[in-house]
Image: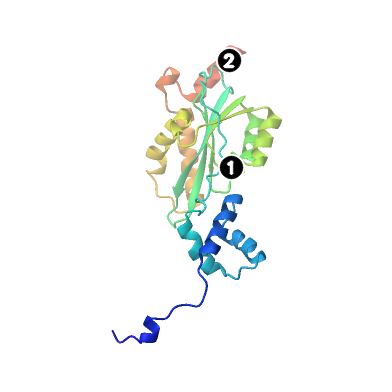
Amino acid sequence: MDLQRSSFRHRSPRPGDEQLREKLRELAHRRPRFGYRRLGIFLRREGYRINHKRLLRLYRPEGIVLPGKRPKKRFWQRPRPLPPATRPYESWSMDFVQDRLGAGRRSRILTIVGDYTRQWKAAVVGGPIGVVRLLEEIGNSTGLPTVIVLANGPDFTSDAFLRWAERREIDLRFIQPGKPTRNAYVESFNGRFREECRDAHWFTTLDDARPAIEAWRTNYSDVWRHSSLEDRTPSEFAAAHDEAAA
Protein backbone atom coordinates (compact mmCIF):
# COMPACT_ATOMS: atom_id res chain seq x y z
CA MET A 1 0.00 0.00 0.00
CA ASP A 2 3.10 2.22 0.01
CA LEU A 3 2.32 3.31 3.58
CA GLN A 4 5.00 3.98 6.17
CA ARG A 5 5.01 1.51 9.03
CA SER A 6 5.37 4.35 11.53
CA SER A 7 2.23 6.00 10.18
CA PHE A 8 0.27 2.75 10.15
CA ARG A 9 1.15 1.88 13.76
CA HIS A 10 0.97 5.44 15.08
CA ARG A 11 -1.08 5.92 18.22
CA SER A 12 -2.18 9.38 19.17
CA PRO A 13 -0.86 10.57 22.54
CA ARG A 14 -3.99 12.64 23.08
CA PRO A 15 -6.36 11.30 25.73
CA GLY A 16 -9.68 9.82 24.67
CA ASP A 17 -12.89 11.78 24.41
CA GLU A 18 -15.03 9.64 26.69
CA GLN A 19 -14.75 11.97 29.66
CA LEU A 20 -15.53 14.96 27.46
CA ARG A 21 -18.52 13.19 25.93
CA GLU A 22 -19.88 12.32 29.34
CA LYS A 23 -19.51 15.91 30.50
CA LEU A 24 -21.23 17.13 27.33
CA ARG A 25 -24.19 14.80 27.90
CA GLU A 26 -24.46 15.93 31.51
CA LEU A 27 -24.53 19.60 30.55
CA ALA A 28 -27.07 18.97 27.79
CA HIS A 29 -29.46 17.24 30.20
CA ARG A 30 -29.12 20.02 32.74
CA ARG A 31 -29.72 22.69 30.09
CA PRO A 32 -31.99 21.11 27.47
CA ARG A 33 -32.45 24.28 25.37
CA PHE A 34 -28.72 25.00 24.95
CA GLY A 35 -27.02 24.23 21.64
CA TYR A 36 -23.47 23.01 21.22
CA ARG A 37 -21.96 26.49 21.12
CA ARG A 38 -23.49 27.52 24.44
CA LEU A 39 -22.53 24.17 25.98
CA GLY A 40 -18.98 24.77 24.77
CA ILE A 41 -18.81 27.93 26.91
CA PHE A 42 -19.43 25.89 30.05
CA LEU A 43 -16.88 23.27 29.00
CA ARG A 44 -14.19 25.89 28.51
CA ARG A 45 -14.98 27.41 31.88
CA GLU A 46 -14.23 24.03 33.44
CA GLY A 47 -10.84 23.87 31.72
CA TYR A 48 -11.52 21.88 28.58
CA ARG A 49 -9.59 23.11 25.55
CA ILE A 50 -11.88 22.50 22.58
CA ASN A 51 -12.88 24.52 19.52
CA HIS A 52 -16.33 24.59 17.98
CA LYS A 53 -15.48 22.20 15.12
CA ARG A 54 -14.31 19.40 17.37
CA LEU A 55 -17.19 20.08 19.75
CA LEU A 56 -19.70 19.70 16.90
CA ARG A 57 -18.14 16.35 15.88
CA LEU A 58 -18.62 15.06 19.42
CA TYR A 59 -22.05 16.66 19.84
CA ARG A 60 -23.82 15.16 16.83
CA PRO A 61 -23.40 11.40 17.58
CA GLU A 62 -24.64 11.80 21.17
CA GLY A 63 -28.29 12.20 20.15
CA ILE A 64 -28.70 15.51 21.99
CA VAL A 65 -29.04 17.79 18.96
CA LEU A 66 -31.81 20.34 19.35
CA PRO A 67 -34.78 20.01 16.97
CA GLY A 68 -35.24 22.47 14.13
CA LYS A 69 -36.77 25.90 14.43
CA ARG A 70 -39.97 25.83 16.40
CA PRO A 71 -43.09 26.84 14.45
CA LYS A 72 -44.24 30.42 14.75
CA LYS A 73 -46.96 31.09 17.24
CA ARG A 74 -50.31 31.38 15.52
CA PHE A 75 -53.41 33.26 16.52
CA TRP A 76 -56.51 31.16 16.27
CA GLN A 77 -59.47 30.06 18.33
CA ARG A 78 -60.81 26.56 18.64
CA PRO A 79 -63.46 25.93 15.99
CA ARG A 80 -66.77 27.39 17.06
CA PRO A 81 -69.92 27.79 14.99
CA LEU A 82 -70.21 31.19 13.34
CA PRO A 83 -73.89 31.92 12.69
CA PRO A 84 -74.74 33.38 9.28
CA ALA A 85 -74.74 37.17 9.10
CA THR A 86 -78.23 38.65 9.23
CA ARG A 87 -77.42 42.28 8.40
CA PRO A 88 -74.73 44.35 6.68
CA TYR A 89 -71.66 45.25 8.73
CA GLU A 90 -72.21 42.32 11.05
CA SER A 91 -69.41 40.14 9.68
CA TRP A 92 -66.66 40.61 7.08
CA SER A 93 -64.04 38.21 5.76
CA MET A 94 -60.49 39.28 4.79
CA ASP A 95 -57.61 37.66 2.95
CA PHE A 96 -54.75 38.36 0.54
CA VAL A 97 -54.43 37.05 -3.02
CA GLN A 98 -50.87 36.67 -4.31
CA ASP A 99 -49.86 37.50 -7.88
CA ARG A 100 -46.67 37.98 -9.88
CA LEU A 101 -46.22 40.76 -12.42
CA GLY A 102 -44.63 40.39 -15.82
CA ALA A 103 -41.23 41.61 -14.57
CA GLY A 104 -41.25 39.01 -11.77
CA ARG A 105 -42.24 41.39 -9.00
CA ARG A 106 -44.74 40.03 -6.51
CA SER A 107 -47.96 41.85 -5.69
CA ARG A 108 -50.80 41.30 -3.25
CA ILE A 109 -54.49 42.09 -3.56
CA LEU A 110 -56.40 42.62 -0.33
CA THR A 111 -59.92 41.21 -0.53
CA ILE A 112 -62.55 42.29 2.00
CA VAL A 113 -65.96 40.66 1.47
CA GLY A 114 -69.18 41.39 3.32
CA ASP A 115 -70.60 38.04 4.47
CA TYR A 116 -74.20 39.27 4.18
CA THR A 117 -74.18 41.49 1.08
CA ARG A 118 -71.25 39.79 -0.75
CA GLN A 119 -69.85 43.24 -1.54
CA TRP A 120 -66.12 43.54 -2.19
CA LYS A 121 -65.13 46.42 0.05
CA ALA A 122 -61.67 47.19 -1.34
CA ALA A 123 -59.30 46.42 -4.20
CA VAL A 124 -55.77 47.31 -3.13
CA VAL A 125 -52.79 46.11 -5.15
CA GLY A 126 -49.13 46.14 -4.11
CA GLY A 127 -47.28 45.95 -0.84
CA PRO A 128 -46.72 46.57 1.90
CA ILE A 129 -50.38 47.40 2.45
CA GLY A 130 -51.49 49.50 5.41
CA VAL A 131 -54.44 47.38 6.52
CA VAL A 132 -55.31 49.62 9.48
CA ARG A 133 -55.19 52.78 7.35
CA LEU A 134 -57.39 51.19 4.68
CA LEU A 135 -59.97 49.95 7.18
CA GLU A 136 -60.09 53.39 8.78
CA GLU A 137 -60.86 54.91 5.36
CA ILE A 138 -63.64 52.36 4.81
CA GLY A 139 -64.99 52.95 8.31
CA ASN A 140 -65.14 56.71 7.82
CA SER A 141 -67.20 56.30 4.66
CA THR A 142 -69.44 53.30 5.31
CA GLY A 143 -68.80 51.94 8.83
CA LEU A 144 -67.06 48.87 10.23
CA PRO A 145 -68.31 45.37 11.12
CA THR A 146 -68.56 43.82 14.56
CA VAL A 147 -66.77 40.61 13.47
CA ILE A 148 -63.91 40.00 11.02
CA VAL A 149 -62.95 36.47 9.97
CA LEU A 150 -59.34 36.25 8.81
CA ALA A 151 -56.25 34.08 8.47
CA ASN A 152 -52.95 34.20 10.37
CA GLY A 153 -50.93 36.42 8.03
CA PRO A 154 -48.37 38.83 9.52
CA ASP A 155 -50.47 41.84 8.49
CA PHE A 156 -53.37 40.54 10.59
CA THR A 157 -51.35 39.51 13.66
CA SER A 158 -49.26 42.66 14.06
CA ASP A 159 -49.48 44.62 17.30
CA ALA A 160 -50.80 47.67 15.46
CA PHE A 161 -53.68 45.73 13.90
CA LEU A 162 -54.60 43.92 17.13
CA ARG A 163 -54.59 47.17 19.11
CA TRP A 164 -56.72 48.85 16.43
CA ALA A 165 -59.31 46.05 16.55
CA GLU A 166 -59.44 46.22 20.35
CA ARG A 167 -59.90 49.99 20.23
CA ARG A 168 -62.68 49.66 17.66
CA GLU A 169 -64.27 46.78 19.64
CA ILE A 170 -64.10 44.41 16.66
CA ASP A 171 -64.12 40.66 17.36
CA LEU A 172 -61.33 39.02 15.32
CA ARG A 173 -62.00 35.37 14.43
CA PHE A 174 -58.69 33.77 13.37
CA ILE A 175 -59.18 30.53 11.46
CA GLN A 176 -57.22 27.40 12.25
CA PRO A 177 -53.84 27.34 10.40
CA GLY A 178 -53.98 25.15 7.31
CA LYS A 179 -57.80 25.23 7.19
CA PRO A 180 -58.70 27.85 4.55
CA THR A 181 -62.23 26.44 4.21
CA ARG A 182 -63.03 27.92 7.62
CA ASN A 183 -62.95 31.28 5.84
CA ALA A 184 -65.34 30.05 3.17
CA TYR A 185 -66.88 33.34 2.01
CA VAL A 186 -63.61 34.99 1.05
CA GLU A 187 -62.08 31.77 -0.28
CA SER A 188 -65.03 31.31 -2.63
CA PHE A 189 -64.68 34.89 -3.78
CA ASN A 190 -60.91 34.56 -4.23
CA GLY A 191 -61.39 31.52 -6.46
CA ARG A 192 -63.75 33.44 -8.72
CA PHE A 193 -61.45 36.47 -8.75
CA ARG A 194 -58.40 34.37 -9.71
CA GLU A 195 -60.24 32.60 -12.52
CA GLU A 196 -62.07 35.57 -14.05
CA CYS A 197 -59.68 38.46 -13.46
CA ARG A 198 -56.18 37.65 -12.30
CA ASP A 199 -55.56 34.61 -14.54
CA ALA A 200 -57.27 36.30 -17.50
CA HIS A 201 -54.75 39.16 -17.58
CA TRP A 202 -50.98 39.51 -17.80
CA PHE A 203 -50.17 42.53 -15.67
CA THR A 204 -46.78 44.08 -16.32
CA THR A 205 -46.82 46.77 -13.62
CA LEU A 206 -48.91 47.77 -10.62
CA ASP A 207 -50.26 50.75 -12.56
CA ASP A 208 -51.43 48.31 -15.22
CA ALA A 209 -53.11 46.04 -12.65
CA ARG A 210 -55.03 48.62 -10.60
CA PRO A 211 -57.56 49.86 -13.21
CA ALA A 212 -58.30 46.34 -14.47
CA ILE A 213 -58.91 45.01 -10.97
CA GLU A 214 -61.00 48.02 -10.00
CA ALA A 215 -63.12 47.58 -13.14
CA TRP A 216 -63.70 43.92 -12.26
CA ARG A 217 -64.62 44.89 -8.68
CA THR A 218 -67.18 47.44 -9.91
CA ASN A 219 -68.64 44.92 -12.32
CA TYR A 220 -68.87 42.28 -9.58
CA SER A 221 -70.65 44.59 -7.12
CA ASP A 222 -72.85 46.67 -9.42
CA VAL A 223 -73.58 44.56 -12.52
CA TRP A 224 -73.49 40.84 -11.75
CA ARG A 225 -76.60 39.27 -10.28
CA HIS A 226 -76.05 36.62 -7.62
CA SER A 227 -78.43 33.74 -7.07
CA SER A 228 -77.65 33.78 -3.33
CA LEU A 229 -78.97 37.37 -3.24
CA GLU A 230 -82.27 36.59 -4.99
CA ASP A 231 -80.77 37.42 -8.40
CA ARG A 232 -79.78 40.92 -7.33
CA THR A 233 -76.41 42.60 -7.39
CA PRO A 234 -74.62 43.11 -4.05
CA SER A 235 -75.17 46.85 -4.31
CA GLU A 236 -78.91 46.42 -4.95
CA PHE A 237 -79.22 43.92 -2.12
CA ALA A 238 -77.46 46.25 0.36
CA ALA A 239 -79.54 49.24 -0.77
CA ALA A 240 -82.79 47.28 -0.38
CA HIS A 241 -81.78 46.22 3.12
CA ASP A 242 -80.92 49.79 4.11
CA GLU A 243 -84.25 51.02 2.74
CA ALA A 244 -86.18 48.37 4.66
CA ALA A 245 -84.29 49.17 7.86
CA ALA A 246 -85.06 52.87 7.49
The three-letter code of the residue at mark 1 reads Asp
| Vertical order, 7 against 137 (above or below) | below
Image quarter (top left, top right, bottom left or bottom right) of the C terminus: top right
| Residue occupying the far right of the picture | 167
Q: Residue at x 60, y 39 (%)?
A: 157
Q: Position of residue 62 (x, y in %)?
A: 48, 57
Q: Is residue 71 visible?
A: yes
Q: Which residue is mark 1?
A: 155
Residue 243 tag number: 2
Q: Residue at x 52, y 61 (%)?
A: 21
The three-letter code of the residue at mark 2 reads Glu
| Vertical order, 133 against 145 (above or below) | below
| Vertical order, 46 against 110 (above or below) | below
In front here: 206 or 7? Answer: 7
In front here: 113 or 11? Answer: 11
Image quarter (top left, top right, bottom left or bottom right) of the N terminus: bottom left
Q: Residue at x 52, y 50 (%)?
A: 69
Q: Pick whichever of labels 2 and 1 is earlier in the sequence.
A: 1
Q: Residue at x 40, y 35 (%)?
A: 191
Residue neighbourhood size for the residue with mark 1, other residues' Cα within 10 Å, grouped as few (<14), some (14–19), many (≥20): some
Q: Mark 1 and mark 2 in contact (Cβ < 8 Å)?
A: no
Assign a secondary structure to mark 2.
helix
Mark 2 vs mark 1: give the one in front.
1
